[in-house]
Image (cartoon, grey):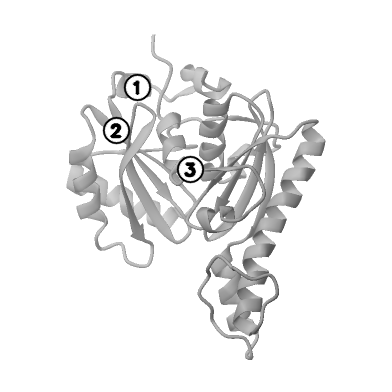
Amino acid sequence: MLCEALRKAESLRPGLRELMDNIASILACDVGNSRIALGCVADEKVSHVRRVSGGDLSSLGDVLEELWRSCPAPARIAASSVRPEHLAAMESVAGKRLGQKILVVGRDLPLPIETNLPVPDRIGTDRLCAAAIAYHRLGGACVVADFGTAITIDCVNDEGVFLGGAILPGLALSAEALAGGASALPSVELVNPDWVFGADTRQAIVGGIVFGARGALRELIESYATELGRWPEVILTGGDAELVADNCDLSATVVPDLTLLGVGLSAQVERK
């Protein structure tokens, strides 16, 4: 079942319903803080996933063309974005190379999930897309934790309403902050710690960051569960999701490309 926001197809701007009718697939784009993820979403599955660093967008045109050829026709391009300048660059490339307009969640497409927030359009649409597809798949209360440049841990109730959540520094960002802010602390490679007590500074930093992320996740889920009155399903996504999930005693499912699936869901309007 689609959330109520997707049922309100009449809220789309004029002509968009006709534009979206009979599409076979969506070239979904997640314009994040440090990179752009792209993939072809069809039949609620994502394939041909590519990622382009936000620090070097020179390959973006080639990636868009490659994926556009891979998406079953007729197709459209849709995106969520938290980096306006990267979105603008991608829109320019899509127009010049593909002759296509990108439909942006929250601008051209309605927000994909109901919220009880005072200003819903101030919430990152990547968070809303991930929450929407998680609820769409599970049909009940859930927590979505995205371990990327930042960590977001959000909650949806049994009625499919996005309640909000928490934002923390991502694992790599935490490591960079320690190395940059304390002259005696080294840069570290983040791995799954097979120790409890850090035997040297590097182990202490890695353990602190990874165990700390797991602890924050557990604490927030427990707090959300108290408010909900029951334990929610937990979905992890993002580049560091597997690292956090390893040896974590929480019952959670890792879905690497959850936000792309959510963008694909957001682009599906009710058809008559």
- Which residue is tagged 2? 76
Q: Is residue 204 left or right of residue 91?
A: right
- Which residue is tagged 3? 255
Q: Is residue 229 above or below residue 183?
A: above
Amino acid identity at mark 1: Gly
Q: Which mark is residue 15?
A: 1
Question: Closer to the N terminus: mark 1 or mark 2?
Answer: 1
In this rendered view, identify the residue nearer to me: 108 or 228.
228
Q: Is residue 76 above or below residue 96?
A: above
Question: Closer to the N terminus: mark 1 or mark 3?
Answer: 1
Amino acid identity at mark 2: Arg
In this rendered view, identify the residue nearer to me: 185 or 86.
185
Q: Position of residue 32 (x, y in %)?
A: 46, 54
Q: Quadrant of the C terminus?
A: top left
Point 58% across, 65% down: residue: 171
Q: Position of residue 234 (x, y in %)?
A: 62, 40
Residue 99 visible, this angle:
no
